[in-house]
Image (cartoon, grey):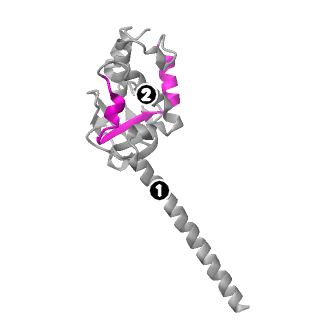
Amino acid sequence: MKKILQLKNLFLILTVSLFIWSCDKNDSEETSMSETMTIVETAQNQDALSSLVAALSTADNSEGTDLIGTLSSDGPFTVFAPTNDAFTELLTQLDGFDSLADFDTDEERAILTTILTYHVVAGVAAKSTDLTNGMTVETVQGENLVINLDGGVFINDATEINAEVLIADVEASNGVVHVINKVLLPQAIIDALNEGEMTN
């Protein structure tokens, strides 16, 4: 009877060990898979970021614009990636723009490019642990974003409403992505809105 109990205990220990090893292996496989994908590929694999991918593709329809190519290059980059809901909210605020397909001229796609490049910081893959309260980061668009760590992780743009980081530190082979709940708007776009230049 003792031998049977000992064998059962040994079998149980082996089963638990095998399960833990299997979980660790799966976790490391998932981590290494996400770290071998570029920022663009990472976004393409997230349903909640399909509007971001569509926006990048739309902007790239203008000659001389290659945001997808840039964000697929070595980097490193830090990207604040708005969700689909964030893009839907933006479109409700723009007169005459019901979908991303409405950015159908070079001038309108240039506006979209300005917005999108305001979400990218080049030359650094900044994880949430690298961010400090009040920190200023310069975007590819040229204007700055301010980090606010009061009660969460927030990104201050040129509007009065901050974007909140919903998912931080999504690692990619060429940088890091932070998923946010709002499309960030630079002052250049605010000025264009105020002057009525963004009505379709």
Query: Could you tell me which secondary element the residue under label 1 belongs to?
Result: helix
Left or right: 91 as drawn, with respect to 159: right
Q: Is residue 67 magenta?
A: yes
Residue 19 image position (x, y, % from top left): 58, 67
Residue in front for this viewpoint, 37 or 138: 37
Q: Is residue 148 visible?
A: yes
Region in magenta: 65-94
User: Where residue 29 is drawn, which disc sits there?
Assistant: 1
Q: Amino acid at mark 1?
A: Glu
Residue 102 image position (x, y, % from top left): 47, 14
> Pointer 1: residues within 10 angstroms few (<14), some, or many (20+)?
few
Q: Is residue 118 visible?
A: no
Q: Residue at x 61, y 73 (%)?
A: 15
The quarter in which the N terminus is drawn is bottom right
Residue 97 image position (x, y, % from top left): 48, 14
Question: Is residue 165 placed above or below 185 in the rendered structure?
Answer: below
User: Where residue 14 is drawn, which disc sits there?
Assistant: none
Q: What is the total number of numbered labels drawn onto the structure image? A: 2
Residue in front for this viewpoint, 200 or 157: 200
Would you name the residue on which mark 2 appears?
183
Residue at mark 1 to residue at mark 2: CA–CA distance: 32 Å
Query: Could you tell me which secondary element the residue under label 2 belongs to?
Result: loop
Left or right: 144 as drawn, with respect to 54: left
